[in-house]
């Protein structure tokens, strides 16, 4: 018996081990810690949280790390073939008429008939003409004693511009050229001709004669003699391309396309054109390529995530604030206050949200609002249309809680009404409110993406995942440029899915009946 009593006796050390003040005693977790413990036991919810953390880092920190700006444009140099000039080889007479005179097609036909028959005189439209052979395949045409026109296979071109030379100067140049003369006199000046048909005055080239008519496509473009010589040499050699360097040192490639129908050549210039680097494939400079505006897709994706998340959180925050205030007042006061607020909620539920948003988006398009202001309006519209569901949730919870003993105690202590609602009632609704808001974030982001996809949401130059995916409106882009829309679609899918997973996890964690 004594031994049993001895066994019941405890040493001081044993008493110290069993003391309730021992720091090693079992600790009771707080409600918040219990919720966190339940949440982190849910692997699916944790997976969603990890995805959300990645998306936030990608969107908010990625833009700071990216070497490019959201609206930075990129260009590339590309060779383009553009028609630059045209060439016609004269195999028939060309007529040049003195200013103020007329020599129409009928007269030209009578002239040809007279030359074939050897008649130096001919009549057209009751007008008598004579012609004189001035040189090889070169004729002057007279009416009375006045020369009114000439006919030749060669063409006289101005070496200093596109303006036509005076009629008499052209005539004298062709007369000298067709008679193999080296010089001729006109107006007291001596002109010299070389074998290539160039006409020199005081050592400077002023004109040249050639059977080829070369004209620039643009009236303000002057074709130099050197260019025309290279072009004609290419034609006569049977080649279809040549390279020419102008006086400014610019080198360009030219290709010739011959048309047998009108015996002409189209001269196309291969020029290096600076253009937007649109739909460039993924490379070292742009890991996800570029979009239709020549902007870096990865950078746009980062900033687009930032905008989508901004809009989602601000809209849900606005809806939560409005819903908590109106739902709290409705649930606490009841009576006519409850009836009035609930009727307002019913009215908002009856509003067709999507058509209203589309109409307002079209109105903002017509008003040409600044993209940043438009984005603010979009958040206000979505926030105002989203609060009724939260107000009903808060009202239902407060109707239950206001009958509890702790509320009777607050009333007995004389605590003012606003403090009773927002200090004692609303905090008890926070768990359900957090779950609802978390689930609403995904649907809000989807709504914004849908509006941006339709062109009614976030506008250029701001990026959002919705307006990035808008490029798939073009079937060619949809089938050939996967890097434009698939990454944005995946980001949108993963973010919305992650919010839903986290919302489910929080709902289970806040459930007091869940097994621990």
Image (tube, helix red, strand yellow):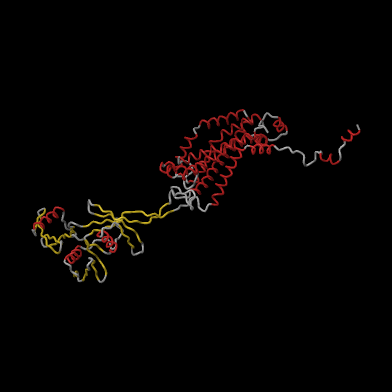
Vertical arrangement, residue 507 with respect to residue 125, above or below: above
Q: Position of residue 509 (x, y in %)?
A: 64, 35
Q: Residue at x 84, y 41 (%)?
A: 13
Vertical arrangement, residue 59 with respect to residue 323, above or below: below
Depth check: give the residue in front, 253 or 155.
253
**Quarter of the image containing the C terminus?**
top right
Q: Residue at x 77, y 39 (%)?
A: 25
Q: Does residue 210 appear left or right of residue 16 in this picture?
A: left
Image quarter of residue 432: top right
Residue farthest right in this picture: 2
Image quarter of residue 317: top right
Depth check: give the residue in front, 284 or 368.
284
**Quarter of the image containing the N terminus?**
top right
Q: Does residue 298 appear left or right of residue 49 in this picture?
A: left
Query: What is the count of numbered marks?
Result: 0
Q: Position of residue 56 (x, y in %)?
A: 57, 45
Q: Position of residue 144 (x, y in %)?
A: 10, 61
Vertical arrangement, residue 171 with respect to residue 77, above or below: below
Depth check: give the residue in front, 493 or 131.
493
Q: Position of residue 60 (x, y in %)?
A: 56, 47
């Amino acid at each position: 018996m004594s031994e049993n009593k001895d066994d019941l006796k405890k040493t001081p050390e044993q008493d110290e081990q069993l003391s309730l003040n021992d720091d090693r005693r079992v600790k009771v977790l707080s409600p918040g810690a219990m919720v966190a413990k339940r949440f982190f036991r849910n692997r699916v919810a944790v997976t969603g949280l990890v995805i959300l953390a990645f998306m936030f880092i990608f969107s908010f920190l990625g833009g700071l790390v990216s070497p490019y700006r959201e609206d930075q444009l990129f260009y590339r140099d590309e060779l383009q073939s553009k028609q630059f000039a045209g060439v016609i080889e004269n195999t028939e007479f060309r007529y040049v008429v003195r200013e103020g005179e007329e020599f129409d097609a009928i007269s030209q036909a009578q002239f040809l008939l007279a030359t074939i028959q050897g008649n130096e005189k001919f009549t057209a439209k009751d007008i008598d003409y004579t012609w004189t052979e001035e040189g090889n395949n070169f004729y002057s045409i007279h009416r009375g004693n006045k020369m009114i026109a000439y006919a030749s296979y060669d063409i006289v071109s101005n070496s200093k511009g596109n303006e036509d030379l005076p009629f008499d100067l052209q005539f004298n140049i062709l007369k000298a050229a067709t008679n193999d003369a080296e010089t001729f006199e006109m107006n007291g000046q001596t002109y010299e001709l070389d074998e290539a048909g160039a006409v020199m005055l005081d050592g400077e080239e002023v004109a040249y004669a050639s059977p080829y008519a070369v004209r620039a496509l643009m009236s303000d473009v002057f074709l130099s003699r050197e260019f025309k010589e290279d072009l004609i040499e290419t034609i006569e050699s049977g080649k279809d391309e040549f390279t020419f360097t102008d006086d400014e040192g610019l080198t360009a490639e030219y290709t010739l396309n011959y048309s047998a129908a009108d015996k002409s050549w189209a001269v196309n210039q291969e020029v290096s054109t600076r253009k937007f680097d649109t739909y460039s494939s993924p490379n070292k400079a742009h890991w996800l390529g570029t979009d239709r505006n020549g902007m870096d897709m990865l950078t746009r994706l980062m900033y687009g995530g930032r905008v989508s998340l901004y809009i989602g959180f601000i809209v849900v925050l606005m809806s939560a604030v409005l819903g908590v205030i109106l739902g709290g007042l409705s649930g606490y006061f009841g009576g006519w206050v409850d009836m009035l607020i609930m009727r307002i909620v019913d009215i908002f539920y009856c509003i067709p949200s999507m058509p209203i948003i589309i109409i307002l988006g079209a109105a903002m398009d017509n008003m040409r609002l600044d993209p940043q202001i438009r984005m603010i309006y979009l958040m206000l519209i979505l926030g105002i249309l989203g609060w009724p569901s939260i107000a009903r949730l808060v009202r239902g919870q407060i109707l239950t809680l206001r009958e509890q003993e702790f509320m009777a105690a607050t009333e007995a202590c004389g605590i003012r009404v606003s403090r009773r609602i927002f200090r004692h009632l609303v905090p008890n609704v926070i768990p359900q409110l957090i779950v609802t808001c978390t689930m609403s974030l995904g649907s809000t982001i989807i709504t914004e993406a849908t509006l941006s996809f339709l062109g009614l949401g976030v506008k250029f130059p701001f990026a959002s995942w919705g307006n990035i995916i808008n490029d798939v409106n073009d079937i060619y882009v949809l089938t050939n440029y996967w890097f434009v829309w698939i990454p944005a679609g995946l980001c949108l899918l993963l973010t919305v899915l992650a919010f839903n997973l986290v919302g489910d996890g929080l709902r289970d964690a806040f459930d007091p009946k869940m097994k621990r």
